[in-house]
Image (spheres, rainbow, N blue to C red):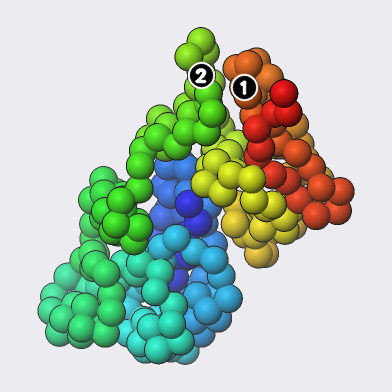
Amino acid sequence: MRLLVAEDEKELSNALVVILKHNNYSVDAVYDGQDALDYGLCGNYDAIILDIMMPKVNGLSVLAELRKQGVMVPILMLTAKSEIEDKIKGLDIGADDYLAKPFATGELLARLRAMTRRKSEFTPNILSMSNISLNRQTYELFSDDMSFRLGNKEFQMMEMLMSRPERLISTEQFLETIWGYDSDVEINVVWVYISYLRKKLLMLNADLEIKAARGMGYTLVQKDD
C-alpha cells in the first residue's frame, strides 16, 4: 500500500517514514500544506496521514480541498492533544479518523489498517488465483506444496498483479505506486523484481505466469495448456 505523509516536523516525519516502510508501506513525505495538496490531487494513494498545523496551507484546508476535488482516499488527521475543535471540524469536513500527538506507533498502525479496510468495505486477507495464493498479513506466496515469504517490493508487485488478474499493469504504474513519483530508481528495477517473482512461481509449480508486453507492462495469466 502507498501512503502520503504530510508532517512539517521533519524528525517526526522521518520517524513515521521509517516505521511505515518497516511495516511494508510505500511512503511519500511532504512538509507543507501546499505540497500535501498537490501530491494528494495527483497521487494514487491508499491513505493519507495529514497534520493540521502546517505552513503555507493548514491541514484542514488541504482536507477540504481534496474532498471538494473528489479525492476520497482515507485520511488520518494528526492533531495537538488539546485541540478538540480541530478534531470535530476535521471529521465534519471528511476526515476518516484522527490521532492526537504524541501517539503510540501501534495505535497509528492499527488505525491505518482499520481505515484501509473500511475503504473497500471488505478486503480479503488471502488473494487466490488458480493454485497460487498470497497472504496479505504474512506476505507469503504459497501453493499446496511450498511457500515463500516475499520481501516488501516483491509483495507489493505480486499484490498488484493478483488484484488485477489478466489485466496489463504498466511499468510506470509499478514505479509510481511502489517506488513513488519522485523516486530516482531506474525503470529496469521493475524487470528485476518481475524476474524474482517468476522464479518463485516456477518453484511453486504455479499454473500462472507473468507475461510481458514489450514496452507496455506485465500481466498475470493462466499458463497455456
Q: For residue 52, what is the image quadrant?
A: bottom left
Query: In the orientation shown, which residue stands out farthest toward the right?
Result: 214
Dot 2, crowdedness within 10 Å: few (<14), some or many (≥20)?
Answer: many
- Identify the secondary structure beneath mark 1: loop
Q: Amino acid at mark 1?
A: Ala
Q: Amino acid at mark 2?
A: Ser
Q: Position of residue 144 (x, y in %)?
A: 48, 14
Q: Position of residue 218 (x, y in %)?
A: 73, 46
CA distance for labels 2 and 1: 7 Å
User: Mark 1 or mark 2, which is nearer the start of the sequence?
Assistant: 2
Q: What is the quadrant of the C terminus in the image?
A: top right
Q: Residue at x 59, y 57 (%)?
A: 177
Q: Residue at x 44, y 70 (%)?
A: 6
Q: Position of residue 74 (x, y in %)?
A: 35, 67
| Disc 1 target residue | 206
Dot 1, crowdedness within 10 Å: few (<14), some or many (≥20)?
Answer: many
Q: Is residue 97 above or below residue 184?
A: below
Q: Residue at x 21, y 78 (%)?
A: 91
Q: Nearer the viewer, residue 2 or 34?
A: 2
- Identify the secondary structure beneath mark 2: loop
Q: For residue 102, what is the image quadrant?
A: bottom left
Q: CB under 8 Å between callouts 2 and 1?
A: yes
Q: Nearer the viewer, residue 99 or 133?
A: 133
Q: Residue at x 40, y 35 (%)?
A: 126
**Circle on res. 91:** none
Horizontal side of 148 relative to 58 (left or right) equals: right
How many numbered circles are shown? 2
**Circle on res. 143:** 2
Q: Position of residue 158 (x, y in %)?
A: 58, 39
